[in-house]
Structures are given as C-alpha cells and as structure tokens.
Amino acid sequence: MYELGTKKSTIRTIFEYGRQRAAEVGEENIFDFSLGNPNVPTPEFVRDAAIDILRNCPPEQVHGYTVAPGNPKVREALAESLNKRFGVHFSGKNIFVTSGAAAAITICFKALAEPGDEFITFAPYFPEYKVFVESVGAALKVVPPSPNDWQIDFDAFQKMLNANTKAVIINSPNNPSGAVYSKETITKLTAMLKHQFNQYGRRIFLISDEPYRELAYGVEVPWVTDYWWNTLVCYSYSKSFSLPGERIGYIVVPNGVDDFDKIFGAIAGAARVLTHVNAPSLWQLVVARCAGKSVDITPYERNGKLLYDGLIAAGFECVKPQGAFYLFPKALEADDYAFCERAKKYDLLLVPGADFGAPGYFRAAYCIKTETIERSLPLFKKLADEYRG
Amino acid sequence: MYELGTKKSTIRTIFEYGRQRAAEVGEENIFDFSLGNPNVPTPEFVRDAAIDILRNCPPEQVHGYTVAPGNPKVREALAESLNKRFGVHFSGKNIFVTSGAAAAITICFKALAEPGDEFITFAPYFPEYKVFVESVGAALKVVPPSPNDWQIDFDAFQKMLNANTKAVIINSPNNPSGAVYSKETITKLTAMLKHQFNQYGRRIFLISDEPYRELAYGVEVPWVTDYWWNTLVCYSYSKSFSLPGERIGYIVVPNGVDDFDKIFGAIAGAARVLTHVNAPSLWQLVVARCAGKSVDITPYERNGKLLYDGLIAAGFECVKPQGAFYLFPKALEADDYAFCERAKKYDLLLVPGADFGAPGYFRAAYCIKTETIERSLPLFKKLADEYRG
C-alpha cells in the first residue's frame, strides 16, 4: 500500500516539475501537456441544475442516502437517455450509478475476478488498469500497440486469449492515443470473443470504459452492447460535463448479460467492499436532469487540429486524433523518456508513451489554452530541428 | 461478491417490510425505528455555502480533480477547525479527505492490514466492520458487550489481545448503543494497549470511528489522539450536517503516529486501490467553509429523552443514551429476533441486537418525527403488557 501511495506516476512528476518551473520562469513560459484535466468549463446548465436542486428540493431528498445502485428515478432517467441516443432498450434496473469511471471499472473487475483470471487490454492503455486489476487478484495482459492507426493488433490479441481470460477491457475514444475503435474493429473483436467462447465454453466479458464517449470528432463511437451480449459499459461525467472532481458515473448491465441477477448482485457486492455506499447524491440528481444534453466539444476539436497540424508541419509522425483530448505522436528517438527529457529544455512537458505501454511515443494532452498550443508550435519545431541536426 | 451484494441486511429487510406495510395501512400507522438516516434537515448554512460556491467560484476550481488527500486549503481548514475545538496542533498534512466514514475506516484497514492480522472491536458494533475488515484479508475479533453501561468489558478485551492484534476499532458515540466512551474508558483502554505494546513490541493502532462526534448530549466525547499516539480518527459529515448521500469525511493522521510518512503513504495507496481518486470536490469546499459551525442537535436529544422515558415507563430496561440517535434496550425475551417479530404486530419496526453482536437487545433509531415517537409509546406499553401476560 505504501508503494502504491507514494510512488509518483510519471505524469504527476512531470506536472509537479511544471508547477516548479512555472514559479521560476512564469506560467506563460511553460507548455504543460501532461494532465488530462478538462479545461472546457462545466456547462452552465449543469451548474444551474445543481443550484436549482439545492434551492428547491427538500434537503433530505437531495442529501439522504440513496440505495446502493442509485436513486431509482436517476437510474430510469439515465437509461432513458441511453435509449434515445443509441436506440437501445434499457430501464433503471440496467444502471448502477457509481463514483466515476475509476470506481465503475474496478467494481466490474472485482465483481468478475476469480483466482487465476486474466483481463486483457490493448496498448496504449490507462496505467491505472494494472493497479486496479491486480488489486482484485487478477492479472492484466496487455496486447502490444498497433501504431499505424491505434486500432487492434488482432494476431497479438489472439495469442493472448486463453481459458483464463475473464474479460477484455477497451477504452474508446482512447486515452492516450485519441483513436476511436471503428465498427470494423468492434465487429472483429467480438467475433474473436465468440470464437473463443465456442472453443473454451467460458463466457468472456467486454468492459467498455467510455469516459470520452462524447468527445469524438466526426466519427461514430459504436455502442458496444449491440455487438456483444456480455458487455459492461462504464461511463463517467468527468470529461463530458467537466466534473472530474465530483466523481459521478455509472455501469450499464444489459439484460442480455449471462446470469444478469448474479452479475448485478456481484456488482453490488463489489461496490460494497469498495465502500461505495452510494454515488454522491446531489450529483446523481444533477446528471439525471442533464443526461443527454449536448456539450460543446469544439474547443477540444480546434485544439486537437491545431496541435496535430503544427506537429505534422514540424515533421512529427502522428495518427490523426478522432476523439478524447490527446495526441500520441512518435517520439523523435527510440527512447521516449530521453525524448521527453530533451523536450523539457523548451519547457514542453510531455508524457513518455512507455507509461501507457507504448514505448517510442509520447502523449500530449491538448485540454489546455489554445493560445498555449499556438505559442508551443515554434518550440516543437525547434525541438524537431535539433533532432534533425 | 454475489452474496455480499444480494444478502439483504436485517435492517434493510425490516425497512422494506415497513415500506410495504405503509402502502397497506398508511404511513401514519407505521412506527419505523429501523434506519439511521438523519431527519434533521441539512443546515441552511451548508446549503447556502454550496450555492455560493457554485455561483461565484470558477467551475474548474470547484469541479476539477483535487490531489488524492484533498484540496490543500480544505485540509488546512479542517485541521484548523480541529485545533480550535480540541486544542490540538494539526496542519493540512494530517488530514486525508475521504468519501465519508465507510471509506475512511476501510482505507485505514487496508493501509494497515498484513496477512494474519486481527482487528478488535466491541459489541455492540456496526456490522459493516466485519465486511470491511475481512475484505482487506484480516480477521475481526469482537469483544462481548458490557450491557450495564455499554462501556468496555476489559477482562474480555484483555483475552483477545495477542501478537496478531493490528488495531482496535472504537465507535463513540456508539451505533447502536448510544453510549459515549468516558475519559476513564479511553484511559484504561489505552493503558492496556501500552501494556500490550510493551509485552509484544508490536505497535497497535486505535481507529476511532466518529461520525456521531457532534451528537452527544451533555457529555464530553474525549479526543482520542490525546490518549494514544497511534490513533487514526475517521470522521464523516453524514450525521452532523445531514449529508449522508454526499459522501464526505476525513481521516486524521497525527504527526505522532509511528512512521508517519509510511502510514500516510499507505493510506494514499489504500485509497488508490479503493478507487478513491478524490473526495467529491464541491463538498470538500463546502465542509471546509462550514467546519466547526455548530449544529442544532436538540431535536435528537428531545426524541431520545421522549423515547427513553416512554420505554422506561412501559417497563423496558435501557441504558440512558448519551449520544448518536439510537436506543438499545433489552428485549422482553431472550430471543431478540422473536421479540422484534412480535413488535411487528403493533407495527413497531425494531432491529434485533444480534445483528450488532449483542443478542437479547434491540435497536430503536429515534432520528424520526417526534410525533411518531409520541404515538408509538402506547404501543410499546401494549407490547410490554403482552409479555407480562
């Protein structure tokens, strides 16, 4: 526990270095691409809903305990919103409201994990997956990256599937690659799960971690329960409503999941031992009222395009981003740590791809001021020129 | 996990029975003493603080991620409030802000637990302790109750202490007994910990679970870090501010704790794997602004006195409540389950003491309408008369 609590993540270390440099040379001279903290303000309709609820609803209905899976009306409203947007047929009983996506995915891991189980994910991936999967006594297997388009290396995936595979974790739109898994990718992935199931007779779950679902730029994000019956969808309002500190999200457990009652019960049990009690009750009411309202993602889209075009012009190789708020370009030397260190000379703060299981790349979070990106571009150019000699 | 998620607690079962009966015979004819849900409304100053923060603070400062132990200014404010009230000398670095007390205690359990460890608590006790302690791989040992005053049976406690004892959990004011541990009790308890430490050389932690600290009626609740250096205090605003659904509380880690850095680091690690991320950020700001403001506990005190006097008049035996919002009288037959079943005939919904490790007693939560208590008293009288034949 001590190591888990004190070993600073690379991202955190870079961010803290940035704060220190900012104190030395001024905030405006630091180009901090390290953190995935939404910079688009929380929509006013979210704030107004919160204030209205606080003003006009009886406090015991706002702040009282809810049952563990969430306020029944909230669950109905969230299901209804999904039905409208994705043509699905959920009801409140398919929703378990959680304290954000970190809780949602870990509750799923803990609900499913049995000794010897393996969970598979695809590089590049959110590094907390490893911490969370191992904390429930299972092993995380990581499929190597597919850097041409950051979709899936299916041959490598095939080799990792075995009788111990309990679940496959996908994250699309992806942190850190910015890729959105296409229909073809999801179709092929689930066909392989089907084949695997037929071979071993052991059901496999797909855990779709979707905090960036609304942050997609002109591409469709397939609704995964349409493709695979044993899918658990994990969602968070951290990014879409810019509410990362409030910890509010949910798990979708479709009726079609094998042994629905058992799985939903196991989710409730896992939530219990993870001290869930209930997701924050005011925010349950707020997101129920605001669910499905569209949010303005153009600031992220604009930033992404600006940074992408600038990096390509400077000579970087990078897959065009389709979603989330990250670029994941190729580093200019094989050692991405060395590359990120060298970038610091220009006060460009970047995160090595090795941290996400994809060495040789780096992550640049563009959820920052557009002006900062504009002023960073000549520095990326200088950095690239330096590498070219 | 399935069993943990689906086996309904006795309290929950009784509560649900009550909802069903209320639908049949009318809300006003049900006397539901089953749930510990605060019925005093959230103080207006709490609501006003929340609205003011939502209106006037930049949303990214309200809703952004905070660092895991909490917003540094919030931690300072909470420490300052403790210093003023208890004459202690904490700073922000002694505070780890959590999602309520369930998270706080379980984070402490997980931070401390090693294979083979035993945690000791005292009956009657909050039944989730067992779930939480076992979930971190340790064993919970329960010292039998001391029904004369619901303080501590020290002889029984002495027999349970051994080289595997990692921590002792106390909960004062107590759920369900309503007792407040006196200075004498805490002094004797910590003297025994000292003796134990001298004998085995293994440090022992005291985990003081204090969600009811402010709900004490004319008695002092000793500040436990004054008595034992290895004390972790777990607090929640669920009861004092009637915010149980919002999940906001904290852990106090005093400087004097052996290996402070290790313990604080382990707490951060335990929080991480319990998917804490950070405590809800709006509520962090709200409780920092409101910490230490006094709350009106007279409705609970009035209810407690009314119910106590009524039960004594009806012939029940009961230790006078000193805090929290529960009475824990002796059942009128040895089998407390049978007694509570019989009470249902009068639509008196009570919780068997066996659920709290104290068979032969029952819990009556008096955080309900005063008028309901008034109207229940003749029914308690009838029930008692029935037992007297």
Image (cartoon, coloured by chain):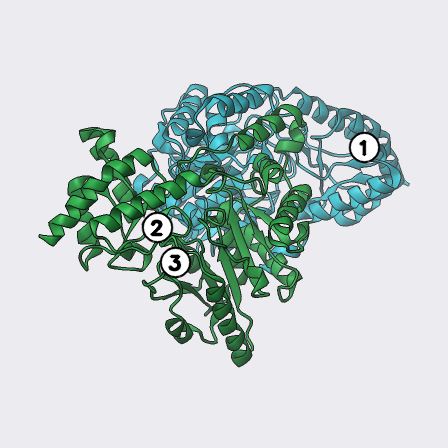
Chain colours: A cyan, B green
Circle nearer the viewer, 3 or 1 = 3
Q: Picture coordinates of residue A316 (x, y %)?
A: 78, 34
User: Disc 3 vs disc 1: Cβ atoms closer than 8 Å?
Assistant: no
| Badge number at residue A315 | 1
Front residue (pair B251, A113): B251
Dot 2 and dot 1 within a common chain: no
Mark 2: amino acid: Leu
Residue B249 makes an appearance in the image: yes
Left/right of residue A41 with respect to residue A68 in the rendered view:
right
Disc 3 designates what residue? B130
Tell me the SS state at disc 2. helix
CA gap between label 2 and label 1 equals 56 Å
Front residue (pair A175, A333): A175
Disc 2 designates what residue? B4
Q: Picture coordinates of residue B14 (x, y %)?
A: 25, 43
Q: Residue at x 37, y 32 (%)?
A: A94
Neighbourhood count class around disc 2 (C-alpha, 10 Å): few under 14, some 14–19, many 20 upward = some
Q: Is residue A116 above or below residue A232?
A: below
